[in-house]
Amino acid sequence: MGADDDGDDIPVDDIVGMTNVDEITEYLEIMVVAANESGFPRNMRKAQREVTLHEVDLRRIKLGADPPVKLEPLRVVLVENAVPFLTKSRQYSTLKKEIPR
């Protein structure tokens, strides 16, 4: 398979993502300031900054041609006579609940 034969029309040398934490933090700080200047509620700004800057290492600035994830397909097998049930809704931290969407 050649570089252009993978069928995804994305250049092989495409940028996969920047993982420089300092640069990502700088971009996030710019976004926080822009949100505040656009009228983000003053009483929520501390929480906004904490949520935005949480787990900075998981964020990226540029996306590109990531390699596929190497996982086995999930197989769900129901036990005979299984009884279906509803689960509770997802629980969010208090901090995330307070941030307007």
Image (tube, grey):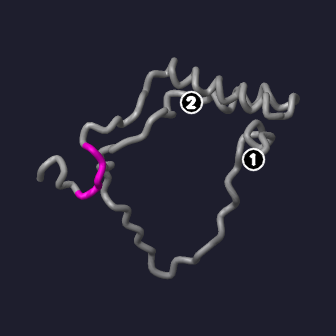
Q: Residue at x 65, y 31 (%)?
A: 52
Which residue is at the front of the view, 70 or 65? Answer: 65
Which residue is at the front of the view, 52 or 32? Answer: 32
Q: Which mark is residue 55?
A: 2
Instruction: Say which amino acid is labelled 1.
Output: Arg
Q: Which mark is residue 1?
A: none
Residue 70 lies left or right of residue 37; in this view the side is left
Q: According to the image, label 1 marks what residue?
A: 101
Indicate which label's residue lies in the foreground, 1 or 2: 1
Question: What residue span does the magenta drawing correspond to?
Answer: 7-11
**In the image, residue 79 above or below residue 17:** below
Q: Residue at x 33, y 44 (%)?
A: 65
Which quadrant would residue 51 be assigned to in this image? Answer: top right
Local SS, label 2: loop
Instruction: Say which amino acid is labelled 2.
Output: Glu
Q: Residue at x 30, y 57 (%)?
A: 72
Which quadrant would residue 62 be assigned to in this image? Answer: top left
Residue 19 lies left or right of residue 14; in this view the side is right
User: What percent of the width, then of the height, locates residue 42?
Assistant: 87, 28
User: What percent of the width, then of the height, locates residue 79?
Assistant: 45, 75
Could you give the CA–CA distance between mark 1 and mark 2, rounded to whole angstroms?
Answer: 19 Å
Which quadrant would residue 47 be assigned to in this image? Answer: top right
Residue 9 lies left or right of residue 48; in this view the side is left
Which residue is at the front of the view, 32 or 50? Answer: 32
User: What percent of the width, then of the height, locates residue 58?
Assistant: 50, 33
Q: Earlier in the sequence, mark 1 or mark 2?
A: 2
User: What percent of the width, then of the height, locates residue 101?
Assistant: 75, 47
Which residue is at the front of the view, 6 or 74? Answer: 6
